[in-house]
Amino acid sequence: MFENLSDRLSSVFDRLTKQGALSADDVKTAMREVRVALLEADVSLPVVRDFVKAVEAKATGQAVTKSITPGQQVIKIVHDELQHVLTGDEDPGKLKIDNPPAPILMVGLQGSGKTTTTAKLAKRLKDREGKKVLMASLDTNRPAAMEQLAILGTQIGVDTLPIVKGETPVQIAKRAKTQASLGGYDVFMLDTAGRLHIDAELIAQAAEVRDVANPRETLLVVDGLTGQDAVNVAQEFDDKIGVTGVVLTRMDGDGRGGAALSMRAITGKPIRFVGLGEKMDAIETFEPQRIAGRILG
Ligand code: GDP
């Protein structure tokens, strides 16, 4: 067993010719290792296939630089291509919050880390950009979830919309909008209800809230440890609601980060932030090179 892809490739190339250009056969052998490493990192099969094809095309026939080994050279090509696939056009951490009060809609399945992420982002906007933020929970089915957001709000010093029993999510969204305008808030964040699985009611409710709130950003929160499931969830939310970005949580866990690559390649949606723990500061802007390093091992 090899520790990581770099070790594997070095070992493969030790057995292969070391001079001149990378031959098609050498590259093919190396690509077998790359394929295994990506699958072990939980990248989905169609994405692995496309990725390997792209790397193979770039690597074949490339002259081997004297200063590095063929293994290192292939690693570099793989690394660059990973970054290329993972990188979006814009600064992922820059939320569109001009024209106050700017609505941000938070969507995702129950347990994905949606409420925690809402509070983390609110704190970030307050601390880093000096924004006045209002948070509102729309999870009328789960009073505990509404309480949880209020508790987090107190903890981080961000206001939450007072809870009024008996309101519908749409009524809460409207009240949040009014309150945000009257109170001079820069941003109001709507933490929508989550469920264990995507169902018609969840989607209908989120769509209704979206139509009322007209969000500047719709951020989908997904559990980064759920691999291919996370990608399916993202695809479905994007098809039905339309999302402007993804937050991958639990990236502090054991996962190798393959979900990030599949997410970007399949949904085309940028990953904006990664959650790195339960604490309120445990969130960072998505950095492709870090995930690339993690996938390569
Ligand atoms: P929600 O149902 O989607 O709103 O999920 P919560 O925000 O209540 O989070 C569920 C659990 O996951 C809580 O115990 C959070 O502290 C935890 N959690 C959220 N984000 C992260 C993360 O990035 N890393 C880790 N380790 N735990 C997280």
Image (cartoon, rainbow, N blue to C red):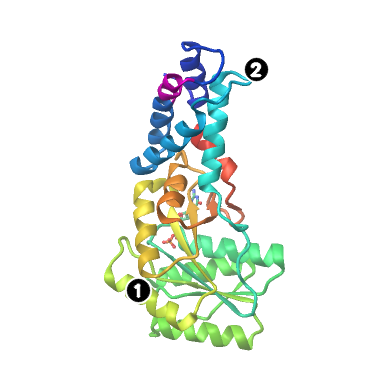
Indicate the position of residue 154 as horizontal and vertical percent values.
60, 69
Q: Which residue lies furthest to the left in this view?
A: 200
Q: Nearer the viewer, residue 218 or 179?
A: 218
- Count of numbered badges drawn on the protein: 2
Picture quadrant where residue 216 is located: bottom right
Relative to residue 97, is residue 44 depicted above or below?
Answer: above
Indicate the position of residue 215 as horizontal and vertical percent values.
51, 75
Q: Identify the residue at horizontal 43%, vertical 75% (top origin).
A: 138
Q: Which amino acid does label 1 sit on?
A: Asn
Does the stretch in magenta take in 26?
Answer: yes
Magenta stretch mostly in which secondary structure?
helix
| Contact (Cβ within 8 Å) of mark 2 with mark 1 | no
Relative to residue 70, is residue 162 depicted above or below?
Answer: below
Identify the disc placed on residue 118. Answer: none
Q: What residue type is labelled 2?
A: Lys
Q: Identify the residue at horizontal 52%, vertical 18% (top origin).
A: 10
Q: Give the range drawn in magenta.
A: 23-30
Q: Mark 2 points at which residue?
A: 66
Q: Identify the residue at horizontal 38%, vertical 52% (top origin).
A: 231
Indicate the position of residue 182 as horizontal and vertical percent values.
62, 88
The secondary element bearing badge 2 is classed as loop
Q: Name the residue under label 1.
A: 141
**Mark earlier in primary sequence (2, 1):** 2
Along the horizontal axis of the image, is 25 left or right of 79? left
Q: Counting other residues with Cα less than 10 Å from the Cα at mark 2, is it few (<14), some (14-19), or many (20 or more)? A: few
